[in-house]
Image (cartoon, helix red, strand yellow):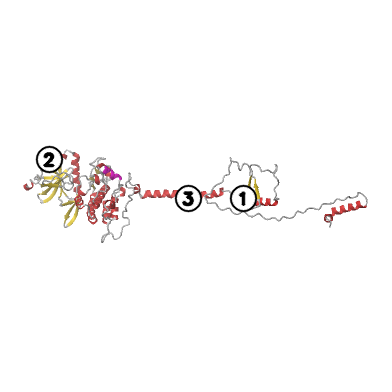
Amino acid sequence: MFAEHLGEDIDKKVCLECQRQFTGIVAACPHDGTTLVTLARDPMIGTCLMGKYDIIDVIGHGGMGVVYKGRQVLMERVVAIKMLQSQHIADSMSVKRFHQEGKASSKLNHPHVITVYDFGVTPTTGQPFIVMDFLHGISLADLIKNENQVGVERSIKILCQSTDALDHAHRMGVIHRDLKPSNIMLIDYEDEKDYVKVVDFGVAKLITAGGEQQKLTQMGEVCGSPVYMSPEQVQGLELDNRSDIYSMGVVIYETLTGRLPILGKTMVETMSKHITEMPPRFNEIRPDLYIPERLEAVVFKALAKNPADRHQTMAELTRDLDTAIPRAGKSQVLRTDFPTMPDLSGKAEKGGNLLSRMSLMHWVIVSAAVLLVIGLGVVAALNSKPAAKTSLPNVNSTAAATTTSTGTTASTSTTTPPAPTSANKVPPTATTATTPNPGAATTTTSSPSSTSPANPPKVAVSSEPPKPKPKPPAPPRVAHKPKRVAAPVVEEDVPHSGAAAAAARRNAATASSDPFKSLLRSRGY
């Protein structure tokens, strides 16, 4: 049966890097330079599986299985048959994962998810197999390699179909966990090009109706391709739908730019960068391309390190992709809740960008703390100003009072100071101050306790600029009256007896009774 295909696999060679097959004398893959490995003739080719499926050819090899091209005998339909390799039959975990892939694929019924027709185990070797659609087309990985990158309009059309299929899988309780461009097939369907089929649910995780997860990986075990893994998947943590959203963000980034967003020299370095580093901006890695900033913001939101900062569902990611570019009949009004580009200024720092991880609550707390500190500073400044003014001695008024009082005193004294004697010498603790008023000298004596070095005078310094000293008031002018000198009294010899003595006694009595007349008489009036 199908003898014409038996001799075709003798000279076939395969590239283990890109899984392309070649015939003839080619020794290395012309696409990536990898040395080709000669394929031995598969014993399954030319046989009829379970009496229902004729094995025609080998399509490709995977990590655990091999995919054949077959034909369903009764339906005369070309199918793809994925079978677990014989060397993995002894590994019970590999067998369980293969069974889980069949269950996960059979639960899905979506136009952009590959259709599963049958599932079983070969009776002779005990190898499990899955019968599914045979897809005529290329993978998204081959399209990116052939064209270096995919245009914006075409990319959005392909990626929206992919996210729509994954949203259906998530709603059915299936997490893919191995999203990459090679698992997104592009076929021609009813004259429509770039029709998407999501394939390979080999490491998918099933969640039962009660929310219980069927785990085939131990805590800390990593499954998938490192360059497309989410940070939580790299660390072996518990996964949910948002892990697929991060992996889809990596696929979108590579589709638009033709470059991987994060890539290290080794697998370990690549996984470490997925945890700590954000990818470069589009204009940095491909300055020759124009990619709208709104679309870039959608991609970087999907690539957030914290799952809470990403799109929470694939439906949300699909909506943002579909409205990222205005089209006729769509996106008439720009949405106000559209994602914004995060700040990537500190992306090279270890530990990630702290500001980009701050939520709205964090910003509210920080703002409240700043306002509290500013308020306390203002209150302290207002309280310190009155204290400084009251503690400052009124030097100007003291000086003016001193000048006024001393000026008046000095003006009533004689201008010629007395000769210094031991009685009027100034003690050592006395200080002499000269007032601004010319001709008026002031001598102020302070007590030893006020000028003692042990008790210096305390003067509070105000933060206000010094005010100019007001001019002291001029001392009042006092009219100098001439000093009247009493006329000398001439004493006459008064007789003690006779008429003269009697007259003198009468004059004395008259003077005592009328002092005014006595004064006039004494002055000669």
The CA distance from mark 3 to mark 1 is 36 Å
> Tag 3: residue type?
Val
Is residue 236 found inside the magenta-colored segment of the image?
no
Label 2: which secondary element: loop
**Residue ranking furthest to the top:** 90
> Tag 2: residue type?
Thr
Q: In the image, residue 432 lies at what x, y percent?
A: 64, 46
| Left or right: 475 as drawn, with respect to 167 | right
> Tag 1: residue type?
Ala
Please tell me how crowded label 2 is: few (under 14), some (14-19), or many (20+) other residues with Cα within 10 Å: few
Q: In the image, residue 302 lies at what x, y percent?
A: 28, 50
Please name whichever residue, 400 or 351, is drawn nearer the observer in this view of the structure. Answer: 400
* Stretch of the chain drawn in magenta: 269-276
Q: What label does residue 378 carry, if any? A: 3
Residue 70, above or below 153: above
Residue displayed at 66% across by 42% down:
427
Q: Nearer the viewer, mark 3 or mark 1?
A: 1
Residue 389 shows in this picture? yes
Label 1: which secondary element: helix
Q: Earlier in the sequence, mark 2 or mark 3?
A: 2
Q: What label does residue 321 carry, if any? A: none
Q: Quadrant of residue 513?
A: bottom right
Please name whichever residue, 232 or 404, is drawn nearer the observer in this view of the structure. Answer: 404
Overall secondary structure of the magenta section? helix
Q: Which residue is mark 1?
A: 399
Q: What label does residue 125 carry, if any? A: 2
Please tell me how crowded label 3 is: few (under 14), some (14-19), or many (20+) other residues with Cα within 10 Å: few
Q: Quadrant of residue 273?
A: top left
Please name whichever residue, 440 or 357, is drawn nearer the observer in this view of the structure. Answer: 440
Q: In the image, residue 102 lies at what x, y percent?
A: 18, 46
